[in-house]
Amino acid sequence: MSTETPRKLPGIPDIPADQRTPAVVQLLELCHRQQEQIQALRDEVARLKGQKPKPVIKPSALEGDRTEKKQGQAPKPHGKRHKTAELEIHESVKRQPAETIPPNSRFKGYQDFVVQELRIGVHNTRYRLERWVTPEGESLIGQLPAEIGGVHFGPQLRAFILYQYHHAHVTQPLLLEQLREWQIDLSAGQLSALITDGHSEFHREKDALLQAGLQRSRYVHVDDTGARHRGKNGYCTHIGNERFAWFASTDSKSRINFLELLRAGHDAYTLNQAALAYLAEHKLPCAQLQALTALAPAVWTGQTAWQAVLAQQAITDPRHVRLVTEGALLGTVVARGVAPIWRSSAMTPGSSMC
């Protein structure tokens, strides 16, 4: 016989605990089962009449003691990590108690308290370039570090300006006001020049990111999205996967544009085995394919040089120009270390071309 306290039923008075004899408890359980059967019959009648049965409403979470734990259930680990356990510590400072330490006190080690802080302030460096004159009259002058780039503003300051302007969307007037408050002697024209000019190092770093991502990835995702760039309609191309992401703004979304982007900043057109196999698969006329095969392997730098090659080989048909250009671009991509998946026997290196 169950000794658990039955829940209160509608229409049945609440019986004090001291009056709940085994017979009373059994009677309450019987009443409970009868009410469940009656409700089940009422729900069935409602369904036969096309009506909705009584909804099942769960008791509110506020009812009962939330602090009660289920019997035999161990507390779940909270999984909360120590917030400062993985932080890099740049400086350690020892602090003594404000009170006078009594004699014969025992030292018990340290209680760590980590404080995160950001240091922002002007830091001016004067490079004193040595000047020498050789016996032959030649002048020798010390060289600035490569990261200075010949400008009077350091790389950290330039990176901060670009981040604030392009990523945080801080306007130039507000950015100029902020820098001047930090005692940076900078004019509005110099700030504009730092934002718009001299970004070749950043572009080389961006191209190196794409090159490294392509060489170390088994696959990449590619997507072209319409976007405005420099006041004109164009496309933003994304290349990447779960390990890296690379973006470029162009005015085209063709296959040639994609292959040009895959060159990662290089301006070469390469005729090699991969390029010739691509041309053979796409049915370039045999005469033109044999002429290009006689030139391979070869590399041309720049679009002007490549256009001269097309003119010398009398390749003028728009379709043929497109195919040969795509093949040369693919050859450059393969030569840079990106291996495509050969899709057919015609793409297999060493296969016959005609």
Image: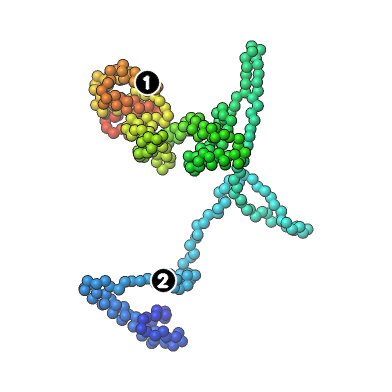
Q: Nearer the viewer, residue 231 or 326?
A: 231
Q: Give yes or no for contact between labels 1 and 2 (Cβ–Cβ under 8 Å).
A: no
- In the displayed structure, does residue 319 sit left or right of residue 332? left
Q: Residue at x 57, y 34 (%)?
A: 187
Residue 84 pos. (x, y %): 57, 51
Between 323 and 317, the one lying in front of the other is 317
Residue 143, picture quadrant:
top right
Of all residues, the one furthest to the top in this rendering is 136
Measuring from the top left, give residue 233's x and y in whole percent. Answer: 36, 36
Residue mark closest to the camera, 1 vs 2: 1
Tell me the residue at 39%/22% (across/down): 302
Q: Which mark is residue 60?
A: 2
Residue named by callout 1: 304
- Where is 18 relative to 161, above or below? below
Q: Is residue 55 left or right of residue 206?
A: left
Residue 286 visible to an observer of this rendering: yes
The quadrant of the rendering that contains the C terminus is: top left
Quarter of image, res 296: top left
Q: Quadrant of residue 268?
A: top left
Give me the C-alpha separation between circle 1 and circle 2. 77 Å
- Between 103 and 289, the residue placed more toward the observer is 289
Three-letter amino acid code at the position of disc 1: Thr
Q: Quadrant of the N terminus?
A: bottom left
Is residue 222 visible in this depiction of the protein? no
**Residue type (three-letter) at the residue carrying disc 2:** Ser
